[in-house]
Image (tube, coloured by chain):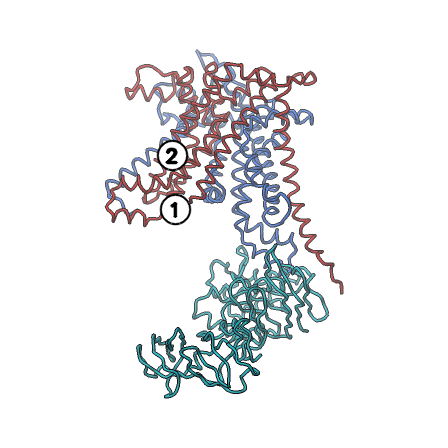
Chain colours: A cyan, B blue, C red
Amino acid sequence: MTIRLEHICKSFGPVRVLEDVHLGFPERAFVTLVGPSGCGKTTLLRILAGLETATSGAIWHGTEKVSDLAPGKRDVAMVFQNYALYPHMDVGANIGYGLKVRGVPRDERERRVREVARVLEIEPLLARKPRQLSGGQRQRVALGRAMVRKPWLFLMDEPLSNLDAKLRVTMRGELKRFHLRLEATTVYVTHDQLEAMTMSDLIAVMDHGVVQQYATPAEIYNRPANVFVAGFIGSPPMNFIEGARLGGGEVAIPAGDRVVPVAASSLAAGADRTVRLGVRPQDVRIDGAAGVPGEVTLVQLVGSEKLVDLDLGAGVRVTAEVKADLPVEQGARVRVSLDPARLHLFDASSGRNLAA
Amino acid sequence: MNQLGFVRQTVAYVVLLAVTFLICFPLIWAFSTSIKAPKEVMATPPRLLPAEATSANYRNLITGKEQYFRADQAYVPTTAAPQHFVSWFTNSLIVSGASTLISIVISTLAAYSVTRFRYWGRRIVPYFSLLGYMIPSIVLVFPMFLVMAQLSLVNSLWSLTFGYVSITLPFCMWLLWAFFRGIPIELEEAAMIDGASRLRVFVDIVLPSAAPGIIAAAIFSLIVSWNDFLFARVFINSIENLPLTVGVMHFFEGTHVDWGLMMAAAVLMTVPMAILFMLMQRHLVAGFGAGAVKG
Amino acid sequence: MHVSTSTDWRVADDRIGILFIAPFVVAALVFMVYPVAESVRLAFYQHNPLNPDAAAFVGLDNFRAIFADPLFWQSFRQATIWTGCSILLQTVIGVALALLLHLPLRGISVFRGLLLFPYIVPTVVIALVLQWMLNPDIGVVNWSLRGAGLIDESIYWLASPNMAMLSTIMLNVWKYTPFVTICVLARLQTIPLELYDAAKVDGAGAVRRFLDITLPQLAEVLVVVVIFRTIWTFNKFEEIYLLTKGGPGTSTFNLAIYSFEQSVASLKMGVGAATGVVMMFLLFAGSLVYMRVFRFASEDA
């Protein structure tokens, strides 16, 4: 059964936190709500959990309206950012608490707890208290507590943000594997666009309480709906050039009227206009003979790639991502070309993608 | 601060020991007196260590034997007080325990309510409590006496219990409020999502987390009610119903003051507090941290 | 499938909140609000507790009686002296002790633990013990002082007015200095050690470091502590009464004892209550000062 959020609005007093959020989550999808701090993603998650009530709008699970149900009655499970493990109970009791509250008999309870612990590889920790565990272990316990009840909806509030970078990478894969195993719908909140891209079936990019775009990762990466989404998703972030002129089948960037060719299908109908040009660093080439002259201002080695900051004159600066073995030094003069098939054109005032 | 030099350290230790000795001296001296026989008690110059230690004073208190003083070859009864010592002790226990229990229950529920729910006036309740704490008991005691008189509770242990609730409740409320504010709400949210009802959350999750604060408040309450003099003096007028604080003042009656007996009573009276004191070492300091500058 | 109406569970939730606060509200009304209100009412009545039916409204007579009574003013004066001396001693000794306990010595936590000991000793106990120790003929204090050659004749600690005042001050200091020490010690422990290191590098000696770093940091805490303890000490009853009963004569009376004597000895509960009202008024004024300063101090922090 799909989950539908219908026109969810939320205000805290005079402050508007969510504006007409209207989304549908397919069954068993992994959906990520991503955006900067304060965009409303956590509030939306809490509304799904029942910890907050929407000011207006409804939530449907199939044909059942769940937005009026108490959190305990919704049969959802949540993993909190700080895990929220019950400090005075041992790991086994923590995991089994939801079952206990629902009156599951002790034998079955213990069986299920042990099974979940086995899957999460925390069986030897069952008798310990939370304060004796490491961050990664606590996280698994929090996961276990959520998994053992076999809910239809899994909510995760930035579960990886308290882990160190290396652990985060491992856990990303693990979380995705658990999701597939559980066959439940997962709604995942994060501010990290990389997590969103690697883990999700669908991403909702949010800013200031409004869903900017709701689509698959590929769609969001290749056809961002507006400047915000384009700049938020993708690392290193997309280059933006203001005041580019569109006309006559070409796009010209305002550095002394230099001309950059653009594929014909990308042109908006007719009239000349000023647009904001977006191009990802991966689509900026500096190894060709043709292109706009530019000066290398900074080279940063990332490992298998290099990030090259370029100054094209008249205040236009872009960053290119090139292979690490390409020889380039600070101060060098190169020819900068932009892949014509990979340009994004945004309306200069509204920021909307012209191709959308 | 880094390590001190050896001389400085020695000086510091000496000073510390001296200060500690001075602070504890009254009780040390009381104990010393309490294990002396009457003749030695009155002997001069007074010595710290008795020549012959005796537990007679303690035995007499506990068995309630009438105490006699030998003066000029004749035995003269000193005071009728010791017969009631055991009742005084149990009275103190009962009243302190009961009032503490009542105060803790009321203030725990109230502190939780004020920090987790929204309704008019919830913000002023803690400050109102603090205000109540500052009211001197001399102001409270006589009106409460009149109420007790009307309820025919005068001279009963119930009147003391209620009296002590009135002086312990405000601070317990303040302490627990400060404490509950520090408990993260995510724990309760997780439990609610797990399916627990609000009441269940309170019992399973909140109370265990609040245990340190509750213990601190309970200890405070026990100490205050055990030590009170004024309420007992005003509310109780028959000797059997007195708690220890007023009871021991009766040792001053009679023809002669039996200091040995009185010091034994003083020591016994302090023992429960000393036990509490040892138990609460960590808790009280934590409690003070949560509260404020209390006196 | 039953779907509960819109805010069902929220309403039930709120009801628990009200239910939980109800006992406190009742208790507060009965045990706090009522006695205070009644005390204020009594202040305007003539009330003999042995003859309650003859109670009569007398307007401001009780207050006039108090303000005309030289004993009242004497009590007020003595309370002020008593409070002032106590606070001064508590503060100085308290800070000194805190500094001592702040030293990085092994086993210092044992000493810190012992420090709160006077607080938990019942006032009755220390009063009794002091009476015994201060006994002019066989008490240990006089004997020790004579033995050390510091005095020739016995001091009448409780029988002479000035000594009685001193004795009660000593009791108060013994019992409550630990509080000052605890608060100051807590503050000392929050002063970042880097400040001292920086000062040492700048060339400041130990005394300078104390004056320029430690003392200013302590100032905030001390102001708050002093005001709070002053409010508290002014109204103390047991610490004086149990040692001297306000005597000899009335030389150690304070307002609380005055009120007590009016109600119990003179059987004038109305006058006692009126004194209580005056005490509450002073308390209130002191609290306002405290709150002003506390806000000031905590904003600074």
Q: Nearer the viewer, residue A4 or C270?
A: A4
Q: How many labels sit on residues?
A: 2
| N-terminal-most mark, 1 or 2 | 2
Query: Which residue is farthest right?
Result: C1
Q: Nearer the viewer, residue B223 or C229?
A: C229
Residue found at x 51% / y 15%: B254
Q: Secondary structure at mark 1?
A: loop
Residue A298 against residue B236 in the figure, above or below: below
Judging by the rendered image, the residue that carries numbered circle 2 is C94
Q: Is residue B156 left or right of residue C278?
A: right
Judging by the rendered image, the residue that carries numbered circle 1 is C190
Q: Is residue B165 left or right of residue A37?
A: right
Q: Identity of the amino acid at label 2? A: Gly
Q: Is residue B27 left or right of residue A216?
A: left
Residue A265 against residue C210 in the figure, above or below: below
Residue A12 against residue C55 in the figure, above or below: below
Can you tell which quarter of the image residue B34 is in? top left
Residue C61 visible from this viewpoint: yes
Q: Nearer the viewer, residue A301 or B42?
A: A301
Subunit of label 2: C
Residue A222: x percent and y percent? 52, 80
Is mark 1 in CB contact (under 8 Å) with mark 2? no
Identify the mark at residue B117; answer none if there is no mark: none
Residue A106 visible from this viewpoint: no
Residue C234: x percent and y percent? 48, 26
Q: CA distance from mark 1 to mark 2?
A: 17 Å
Residue found at x 63% / y 20%: C44
Q: Identity of the amino acid at label 1? A: Thr
Can you tell which quarter of the image residue B105 is in? top right
Q: Quadrant of the C terminus of chain C?
A: top left
